[in-house]
Image: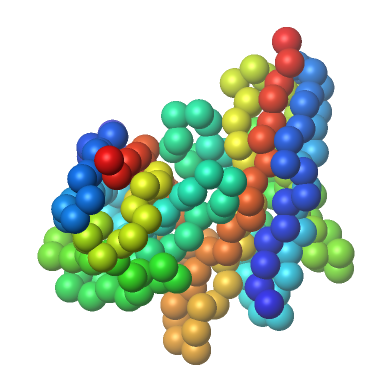
């Protein structure tokens, strides 16, 4: 089965700690994305990557970091610099934007709910 | 400004009836794409349907259809023959060009909560 997996499903963090959220896909997609969802709000883009070893900041990158060492994996680290990290985090992937046959449809994982204690 | 507006915070529909969820958009791009996603209480965002700005026919996927009115800048989702499992949040999103390069981004609406009554 092809798809996107995120782990853990629930994560609790103490203030001042860094935590890393995992995202893996076996869809052979080039592009991967991290979003944050807060209650009553739409999704906001944190980081995205179109190719291995390259990534760009989204709209709310401050306090977050990512890496893209493998095509299949795009982990997100929530650092202690992120002042209000409690939220639902969604990872997505798509065929590389710009290919003629691509509609850029993003497919999502099941999400990780992060709570700061 | 590029924006998606979903004016219905919550909607109710009787099982087996049809329901329309509204979405209006604002962009100056000539080339854009419109998406609808479903988010059940489990949290996963499920892709439902896509409409490209140059597509002349309204998109359909099973019980889902997209009523695309370009001049009005609206892309309403129609769900026919509602089922109890359709109860969820529904998000409209628009793909636009994010900068002068080939990068694109999705602009998201705030969502509509749909409840299907038995």
Residue A53 visible at all: yes
Q: Nearer the viewer, residue A93 or A100?
A: A93
What residue lies at 44% left-to-right and 37% top-to-bottom? Answer: B44
Q: Nearer the viewer, residue A36 or B34?
A: A36
Residue A107: x %, y % from top left? 42, 49
Q: Residue furthest top?
A: B118
Residue B14 appears in which quarter of the rendering? top right
What residue lies at 22% left-to-right and 61% top-to-bottom? Answer: A79
A79 lies above or below B77: below
Residue B100: x %, y % from top left? 50, 89
Q: Residue furthest bottom?
A: B100
B107 lies above or below B97: above
Q: Quadrant of the C terminus of chain B?
A: top right
What residue lies at 28% left-to-right and 73% top-to-bottom? Answer: A55
B99 left or right of B87?
left
Residue B39: x %, y % from top left? 53, 37
Q: Nearer the viewer, residue B109 or B20?
A: B109
Residue B63 appears in which quarter of the rendering? top right
Q: Residue furthest right?
A: B72
Residue B88: x %, y % from top left? 60, 31
Q: Quadrant of the N terminus of chain B?
A: bottom right
Q: Nearer the viewer, residue A95 or B116?
A: B116
């Amino acid at each position: 089965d092809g798809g996107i997996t995120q782990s853990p499903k629930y994560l609790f963090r103490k203030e001042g700690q860094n935590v890393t959220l995992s995202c893996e896909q076996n869809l052979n997609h080039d592009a991967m994305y991290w979003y944050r969802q807060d209650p009553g709000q739409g999704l906001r883009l944190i980081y995205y990557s179109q190719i291995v070893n390259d990534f760009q900041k989204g709209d709310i990158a401050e306090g977050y970091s990512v890496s893209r060492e493998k095509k299949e994996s795009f982990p997100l680290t929530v650092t202690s610099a992120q002042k209000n990290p409690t939220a639902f985090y969604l990872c997505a992937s798509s065929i590389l934007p710009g290919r003629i046959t691509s509609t850029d449809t993003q497919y999502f994982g099941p999400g990780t709910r992060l709570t700061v204690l | 400004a590029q924006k998606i507006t979903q004016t219905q915070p919550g909607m109710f529909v009787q099982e087996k009836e049809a329901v329309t969820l509204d979405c209006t958009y604002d962009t100056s791009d000539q080339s854009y794409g419109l998406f609808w996603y479903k988010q059940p209480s489990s949290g996963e965002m499920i892709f439902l349907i896509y409409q490209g700005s140059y597509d002349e026919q309204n998109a359909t996927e099973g019980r889902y259809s997209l009523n695309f009115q370009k001049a009005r800048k609206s892309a309403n989702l129609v769900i026919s023959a509602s089922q109890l499992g359709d109860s969820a949040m529904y998000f409209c999103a628009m793909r636009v060009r994010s900068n002068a390069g080939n990068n694109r981004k999705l602009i998201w609406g705030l969502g509509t909560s749909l409840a299907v009554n038995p």
